[in-house]
Amino acid sequence: MILRDAVPGDVPALMTLWNQQIRETAITFTTEEKTEEGLTAEIAACAREGRAFLVVEEGGVAIGLATWFAFRKGPGYAHTAEHTVVLAPSAQRHGTGRALMGALEDHARQAGIQVLVAAVTGENAAGRAFHLALGYCEVGYMPQVGRKFGRWMDLVLLQKQLR
């Protein structure tokens, strides 16, 4: 397992991984699949802005990703960030996610982030448990704020103090 910064060559594997979860799961509310152009631009923006876009590679292929981004616009939220973490099913329950999140949190901390937020769909019990095991606390529950697969879904907000 190699943990490193994402590069444009990772885009095909990341699209496959992320788009499968978008199409087939309630892990994310979005129904808009990632594009080559969009992911390439996001990796470049992270590098340019000093944000992390990390991947875990195994056998030369990206099997997981994590990135952080602004929680909300405005200077008052400059030290709070939200994150995304996506793992291939084969990478789950082997410490891969824990290693990826540890590196992401270290990067965010060094960038001056005080609080890292996870927004997890209410149906994603594994995602909630994962974050709780990493020291995140549930701080909010928003019923029926997302819609996917023809049904309303809840959102759970978790946060971790990094400093």
Image (cartoon, helix red, strand yellow):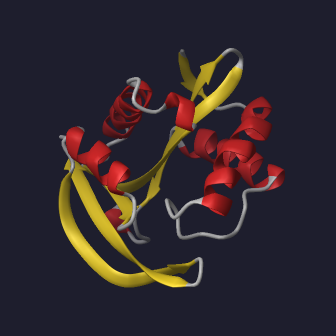
Image point (71%, 31%), residue name: 7
Residues 89 and 22: in front is 89
Residue 25 vs 30, above or below: the answer is: above
Q: Is residue 54 visible?
A: no
Q: Position of residue 142 (x, y in %)?
A: 30, 79
Asked if residue 158 lies left or right of residue 16, the reply is left
Asked if residue 54 lies left or right of residue 83, the reply is right
Q: Is residue 46 visible?
A: yes
Asked if residue 79 lies left or right of residue 18, the reply is left
Q: In which quarter of the image is the N terminus?
A: top right
Q: Where is residue 9 in the image (x, y as percent from the top left)?
A: 79, 30
Residues 107 and 19: in front is 19
Q: In terms of image quadrants, where is residue 4?
A: top right
Image point (30%, 67%), residue name: 156
Residue 101 vs 57, above or below: the answer is: below
Residues 120 and 11: in front is 120
Q: In which quarter of the image is the C terminus?
A: top left
Residues 153 and 45: in front is 153
Q: Where is residue 43 in the image (x, y as percent from the top left)?
A: 67, 43
Image point (38%, 24%), residue name: 95
Q: Position of residue 122 (x, y in %)?
A: 35, 68
Count the numbered circles shown. 0
Image point (31%, 37%), residue name: 109
